[in-house]
Image (cartoon, rainbow, N blue to C red):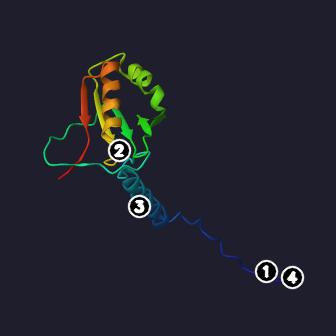
């Protein structure tokens, strides 16, 4: 029998390059994920305003689409249940800022009826969101 000399292999330490690649990949992922802007549940075309001032985001956001669909804080609401929903939102603090986003093709009569229902529910601070001129 022939003895074959074997060399003892030293244990290899894990390389740093793959770990650095993973760290950079996670860094890029969180940078991109953190910069994604929240989008509206339904698509609306905002009207253009010639003047006005920018307010901070309201505490209650109402989105009204061109087909008269209503979204209150990302929840769809039937037009018949809108008044009750607004009363619930304004029960604790009737001075909440209500941000209203409505499509520019929405009939003005429907918009006025929504604003009247907000007033009936006790809302006093309504902010209309538009596109700057």
Q: Residue 111, position in %: x, y?
A: 32, 36
Badge 3 or badge 1: first in the primary sequence: 1
Q: Earlier in the sequence, mark 3 or mark 4?
A: 4
Where's residue 31, x and y in %?
A: 36, 55
- Residue designated by label 3: 24
126 sits left or right of 34 in the view:
left
Calculate the distance from the C-alpha at mark 1 to the C-alpha at mark 2: 92 Å
Tag nearer the camera, 3 or 4 = 3
Please tell me the numbered disc located at residue 106.
2
Label 1: state its secondary structure: loop
Between 95 and 49, the residue placed more toward the observer is 49
Mark positioned earlier in the residue sequence (2 or 3): 3
Residue found 39% across the figure and 48% down from its top = 39
Residue at 29% x, 49% y is 46
Image quarter where the N terminus lies is bottom right
Label 1, on which residue? 3
Which marked residue is nearer to the observer: mark 3 or mark 1?
3
* Direction right: furthest residue: 1
Please give left or right for residue 63 compared with residue 12 in the image: left
Q: Are marks 2 and 4 in contact (CB under 8 Å)?
A: no
Mark 1 nearby-residue class (10 Å; few <14, some 14–19, many ≥20): few
Pointers 1 and 4 in contact (C-beta within 8 Å): yes
Q: Disc 4 marks which residue?
A: 1
Residue at image position (15%, 40%) is 53
Q: Which one is in front in this view, the residue at disc 2 or the one at disc 4? A: 2
Residue sitting nearer the eye, 3 or 122: 122
* Label 3 packing within 10 angstroms: few (<14), some (14-19), many (20+): few
Looking at the image, is mark 1 or mark 2 earlier in the sequence? 1
Alpha carbon distance from label 2 to label 3:
47 Å
Q: Is residue 45 above or below residue 88?
A: below
């Amino acid at each position: 029998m022939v003895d074959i000399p074997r060399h003892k292999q030293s244990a290899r330490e894990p390389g740093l390059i793959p770990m650095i690649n993973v760290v950079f990949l996670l860094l890029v992922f969180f940078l991109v994920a953190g910069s994604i802007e929240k989008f509206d549940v339904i698509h609306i075309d905002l009207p253009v305003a010639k003047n006005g001032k920018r307010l901070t985001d309201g505490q209650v956001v109402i989105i009204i689409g061109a087909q008269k669909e209503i979204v209150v804080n990302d929840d769809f609401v039937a037009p018949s249940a809108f008044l009750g929903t607004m009363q619930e939102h304004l029960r604790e603090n009737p001075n909440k800022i209500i941000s209203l986003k409505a499509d520019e093709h929405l009939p003005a009569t429907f918009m006025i009826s929504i604003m009247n229902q907000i007033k009936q529910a006790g809302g006093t601070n309504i902010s209309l969101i538009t596109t700057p001129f």
